Image: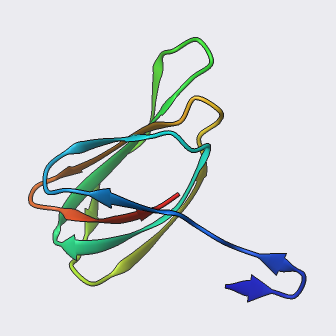
Amino acid sequence: MSFGAVSIRHTSLICPLNTATTIRDSAVGGFLAITTGTVTLDAISGTGSVVNIFTALPVTAGQWTFIPFLLGSNGGTFTTAGGASGVLAV
């Protein structure tokens, strides 16, 4: 996607059904759900503590969910639950 001189690029991270996936990148762009369920995003702070960004956000199969969050250099964890799976753009 391009907005004039600004380009947006993401790497795909597969998020299996009902699994916590480690994010090693500093930002998240969005999630394409393959199956319906909920997702949770946690960041890891500079002190190593878990900082919850959101919990149990509903996602629908085939739908793109825009998730523009900066996690910081320690990354975080993206958890699929309730039957959710898909592709996370990081």
As drawn, is 57 to the left or to the right of 5?
A: left
As drawn, is 80 to the left or to the right of 71?
A: left
Q: Where residue 72 sits in the image (x, y, percent)?
A: 65, 36
Q: Quadrant of residue 55?
A: top left
Q: Where residue 89 sits in the image (x, y, percent)?
A: 48, 64
45 vs 55: above or below: above
Extreme residue toward the top, this view: 47
Nearer to us in this view, 50 or 10: 10
Q: Where residue 32 sits in the image (x, y, percent)?
A: 35, 74
Q: Where residue 14 sits in the image (x, y, percent)?
A: 31, 60
As drawn, is 6 to the left or to the right of 43?
A: right
Task: Please indicate, yes or no, whether residue 18 appears anywhere in the rendered image.
Answer: yes
Nearer to us in this view, 72 or 16: 16
Q: Residue at x 75, y 85 (%)?
A: 2
Task: Please indicate, yes or no, whether residue 55 appears anywhere in the rendered image.
Answer: no
Extreme residue toward the right, this view: 5
Position of the N terminus, as image quadrant, is bottom right
Nearer to us in this view, 38 or 76: 76
Extreme residue toward the left, this view: 83
Instruction: Report the label total.
Output: 0
Q: How is the image coloured?
A: rainbow
As drawn, is 34 to the left or to the right of 45?
A: left
Q: Residue at x 65, y 71 (%)?
A: 9
78 vs 84: above or below: above
33 vs 71: above or below: below
Q: Residue at x 21, y 79 (%)?
A: 61
Q: Quadrant of residue 79?
A: top left
